[in-house]
Image (cartoon, rainbow, N blue to C red):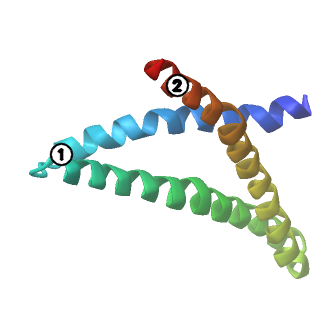
């Protein structure tokens, strides 16, 4: 059960993030930029902003604040310790996500690229 709760959210994020570049390219194509390279550059900016701001900072800070508010109501002196431990738990989630990326998707992607040329 703990393996399922540890891996399932990371897998959901993994599949969402795999479809996000296509969506960002589509949004960038709607922006009306004059060249294909500028459209790709804008799509990359959108993708990076979403991944960094929303996926990491947004989730980590929001989770930390929720835990801190609960801790503040129960015991105001231990708020910083609770917030620190909740951010550490969120970081474990992202480490699991990155491990899935490196151990699963990158080798599969390399095999697909290799099979195209052989």
The N terminus sits in image quarter: top right
State which quadrant residue 58 falls in: bottom right
Image location (x, y in percent) of residue 37? 21, 50
Image location (x, y in percent) of residue 40? 28, 48
Q: Secondary structure at mark 2?
A: helix
Task: Please tell me which residue is depicted at 88% across the width and 69% down the height of the picture.
Answer: 74
Give the answer, above or below, for where 88 lies relative to 20.
Answer: below
Looking at the image, residue 34 sits to the left or right of residue 54; the answer is left
Image location (x, y in percent) of residue 12? 63, 32
Residue 12, visible in the rendered structure: no
Task: Please tell me which residue is depicted at 51% across the width and 19% down the height of the picture.
Answer: 115
Task: Please tell me which residue is depicted at 87% across the width and 32% down the height of the picture.
Answer: 3
State which quadrant residue 67 falls in: bottom right
Image location (x, y in percent) of residue 51? 51, 53
Q: Secondary structure at mark 1?
A: helix
State which quadrant residue 9 falls in: top right
Instruction: Name the one closer to the observer, 14 or 9.
Output: 14
Mark number for residue 18? none
Is the residue marked by circle 1 packed among few (<14), some (14-19), or many (20+) residues within 10 Å?
A: few
Give the answer, above or below, for where 61 lies relative to 108.
Answer: below
Tag 1 or tag 2, which sits nearer the N-term?
1
Question: Where is mark 2, residue-wise?
Answer: 114
Question: Where is mark 1, residue-wise?
Answer: 36
Looking at the image, residue 90 sits to the left or right of residue 109; the answer is right
CB-based contact (under 8 Å), mark 2 and mark 1: no
Q: CA distance from mark 2 to mark 1?
A: 26 Å
């Amino acid at each position: 059960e703990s393996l399922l709760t540890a891996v399932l959210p990371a897998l959901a994020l993994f599949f969402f993030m795999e479809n996000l570049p296509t969506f960002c390219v589509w949004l960038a194509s709607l922006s009306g930029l004059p060249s294909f390279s500028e459209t790709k550059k804008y799509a990359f900016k959108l993708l990076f902003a979403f991944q960094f701001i929303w996926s990491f900072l947004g989730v980590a800070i929001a989770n930390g604040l929720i835990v801190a508010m609960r801790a503040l109501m129960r015991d105001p002196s231990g708020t910083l310790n609770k917030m620190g431990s909740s951010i550490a738990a969120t970081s474990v989630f992202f480490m699991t996500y990155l491990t899935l990326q490196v151990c699963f998707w990158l080798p599969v992607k390399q095999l697909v690229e290799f099979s195209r040329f052989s």
